[in-house]
Structure formats: structure tokens, C-alpha cells
């Protein structure tokens, strides 16, 4: 293989890099913005896809965010690549805030009757039955809808003008280059 590492990364190192980037979260964020601006779909499709991805990132069902984002982007006609990039709104820095807010809002939507549950993961989450997790997942599943819609609307309102501005700037640069090539001032 042409671009292979001299020493293969261990399984643990690959997992660590997926949870915490090598460089920084800001560099990873800049890369996502760069990729969003350069997508070839319309600004509306890119913003809609990103909003769908951000919405799916607020759900409490880890491991299904990308599949959910792709399916929803396909249904609403958004960019699938932008939807996948939108799922990166959910990361180790934002998940605690999203989970807390979805639980609290879901609890309010249920009338505030869900009792505060002590979460004990010392035995592992996969040894627990769904009956133990359901009192936590029920309010989160309900609360992720308004939180996700708010994040989706906000991300749409931020991404669409960003993509439009990039495209206008790029078009002006190309027009200036073509004028210079023709010798016009």
C-alpha cells in the first residue's frame, strides 16, 4: 500500500483518536466547516443536511446517529455528506449538555413526574436491562425532539449564509482570474 504507517496503530490508539482528536477539537471543527463550504449541492441542501445531522446527534441512541442522519437527509432532500458532518455536533464536549437538557425537558413534558434516577454504571450499561434504562431513556427520547429542533434551526440559520458567502466569494475570485487571464483590468 502506498500510504501506510510504518507501525500499525493499536486498537486502543484508534479508539482514542475517535474520541479525542490528535490535534484539537478546533482544528477538527475548522475541517468540518471547510468541507461544508465546498460541497457541490445548493446552499439550502447543505444547510438542511447539516441541520438534520445536528438533530440526529441530540437523540440518546448512540451508534445510530449517522444512519439516522443519512435516512432523514434522504427523506427531506438534504445533502447526505452534510448530514454526516452535522452529526459531529454531538461530541464528548457537547453530549453531557445535550443529554442533561433532553432529560430535563423530557421530564417537564411528561409533567415532571419522572423521579430523579441514580445512574450506576459500575456493573456496566450492557448488563442492565431495558427496564432499568427506560426511566432515563423515556424522558430523553421525548426531550430530544424540541432540543434537536432548536439546534437544527440554529444550525440551518448559521450554515446556509456561510455556504452562500463562500460561493459568492469564490465566484468573484474566479471572475477576477478570468479577467486577468484575458488581460482586462
Image: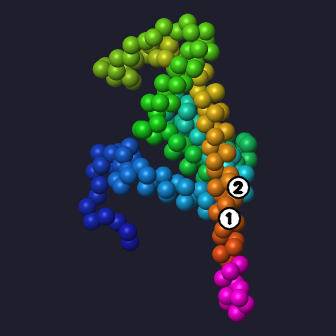
| Residue 37 at x, y percent in the picture | 61, 59
* Residue under the image location 65 percent in, 57 percent down: 163
Mark toward the start of the polypeptide (2 vs 1): 2
Decide: is 58 above or below 22.
above
Tag on residue 113?
Answer: none
Report which residue position mark 2 lands on. Answer: 43
Chain part drawn in magenta: 175-185
Residue at the extreme bottom of the image, as rendered: 183
Pointer 1 local density, CA inside 10 Å: few below 14, some 14–19, many at least 20: some
Tag 2 secondary structure? helix
* Residue under the image location 64 percent in, 63 percent down: 166
Q: Which one is nearer the viewer's eye here, 2 or 45?
A: 45
Side of 72 relative to 104 (left or right): right
Mark 2 vs 1: CB contact within 8 A: yes
Side of 136 relative to 152 (left or right): left
| Residue 69 at x, y percent in the picture | 61, 41
Q: Is residue 70 visible?
A: no
Tag on residue 167?
Answer: 1
Q: Which one is nearer the viewer's eye here, 128 or 157?
A: 157
The span from disc 2 to disc 1 (Cα, nearest Å) is 9 Å
Pointer 2 local density, CA inside 10 Å: few below 14, some 14–19, many at least 20: many
* Residue under the image location 35 percent in, 17 percent down: 120
Side of 140 relative to 96 (left or right): right
Amino acid at each position: 500500500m502506498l500510504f501506510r504507517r510504518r507501525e500499525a496503530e493499536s486498537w486502543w490508539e484508534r479508539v482514542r483518536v475517535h474520541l479525542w482528536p490528535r490535534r484539537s477539537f478546533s482544528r477538527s471543527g475548522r475541517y468540518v466547516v471547510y468541507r461544508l463550504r465546498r460541497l457541490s449541492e445548493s446552499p439550502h441542501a447543505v444547510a438542511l443536511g447539516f441541520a438534520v445531522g445536528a438533530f440526529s446527534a441530540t437523540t440518546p441512541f448512540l451508534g445510530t446517529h449517522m444512519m439516522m442522519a443519512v435516512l432523514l437527509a434522504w427523506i427531506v432532500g438534504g445533502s447526505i455528506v452534510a448530514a454526516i458532518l452535522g452529526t459531529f455536533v454531538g461530541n464528548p464536549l457537547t453530549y453531557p449538555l445535550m443529554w442533561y437538557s433532553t432529560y430535563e425537558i423530557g421530564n417537564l413534558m411528561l409533567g415532571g413526574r419522572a423521579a430523579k434516577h441514580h445512574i450506576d454504571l459500575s456493573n456496566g450499561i450492557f448488563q442492565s436491562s431495558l427496564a432499568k434504562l427506560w426511566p432515563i431513556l423515556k424522558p430523553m427520547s421525548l426531550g430530544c425532539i424540541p432540543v434537536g429542533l432548536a439546534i437544527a434551526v440554529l444550525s440551518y440559520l448559521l450554515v446556509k449564509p456561510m455556504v452562500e458567502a463562500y460561493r459568492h466569494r469564490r465566484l468573484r475570485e474566479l471572475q477576477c482570474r478570468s479577467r486577468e487571464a484575458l488581460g482586462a483590468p
